[in-house]
Image: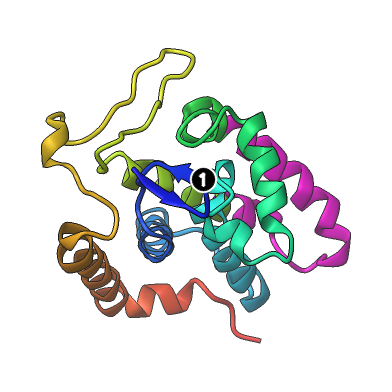
Amino acid sequence: MVNVRGWVTISSMTGRTHDLAAATALVATAIVLQPTPVNLATALAALLANQIGGIAPDIDQPTAPFWRNLPIGGFFGRIFGKLLGGHRFLSHSLVGVVVFGLAARALINFLHPLMPHIDIGIVWVAFMIGVCSHLVMDSFTREGVPWLLPVPVKFGFPPVRSLRVTTGKKMEVILIFPLIALGLIWLCSTHYVLLQQLILRP
């Protein structure tokens, strides 16, 4: 455990690893499902939503990237942390995924009149892919993830805790992050034509 500015935080993947994992999951899903082509505005909005989703579960800790980018993010982070039961609790469970999904759908529907040419269904799915990728990646860390709350058990992979990743340590920096980056590069390079066809030209 690491103490940051007086707050105790439990190890999880670093923000940049979550960003990359969310983007990789989004690209992989697009390749497999091959949705109806979308306009550029929808593609950009989906990518933004995906990146927000990739860090959203960490709203339960005030030192998370989600809050650090806001002027008084630490204040709100402390409030949300208490409401969500602390780090690696509600927001890192299947219940949390449902809550994120409902909240995101309501917010996107509310904002839709401001962006009528964007396919909000695609944007919502991209956000949820980011959220789910976060939980999957955190399952590889020593702390694990309480997928089945209210069942008080944290699941991780591999099952042996000592074999899992510690945030910012060599395993993540020299293995996990590079492997995800290479995976994203490979997906984009081998499916370039398909990905290009998924975006409508003006």
| Magenta-colored span | 98-125
Camera-nearest residue between 188 and 48: 48
The residue tagged 1 is 7
Question: Can you say whether 109 is above or below 50 in the image?
Answer: above
Q: Residue furthest right?
A: 113
Count the labels in the image: 1
Measuring 59% from the left and 67% from the top, which residue is drawn there?
48
Q: Is residue 154 visible?
A: yes
Check residue 66 for magenta coloring.
no
Camera-nearest residue between 122 and 202: 122
Camera-nearest residue between 30 and 96: 96
Percent x, y for residue 153?
34, 18
Picture quadrant of residue 96:
top right
Is 105 situated left or right of 192 in this image?
right
Is 51 situated left or right of 137 in this image?
right
Percent x, y for residue 157?
20, 36
Question: Can you say whether 12 is above or below 153 in the image?
Answer: below
Is 123 situated left or right of 168 in this image?
right
Measuring 15% from the left and 63% from the top, which residue is drawn there?
175
Measuring 58% from the left and 71% from the top, which residue is drawn there?
43
Q: Is residue 128 visible?
A: no
Q: Residue furthest bottom?
A: 202
Prevalent SS, magenta region: helix
Check residue 110 for magenta coloring.
yes
Is 146 situated left or right of 100 in this image?
left
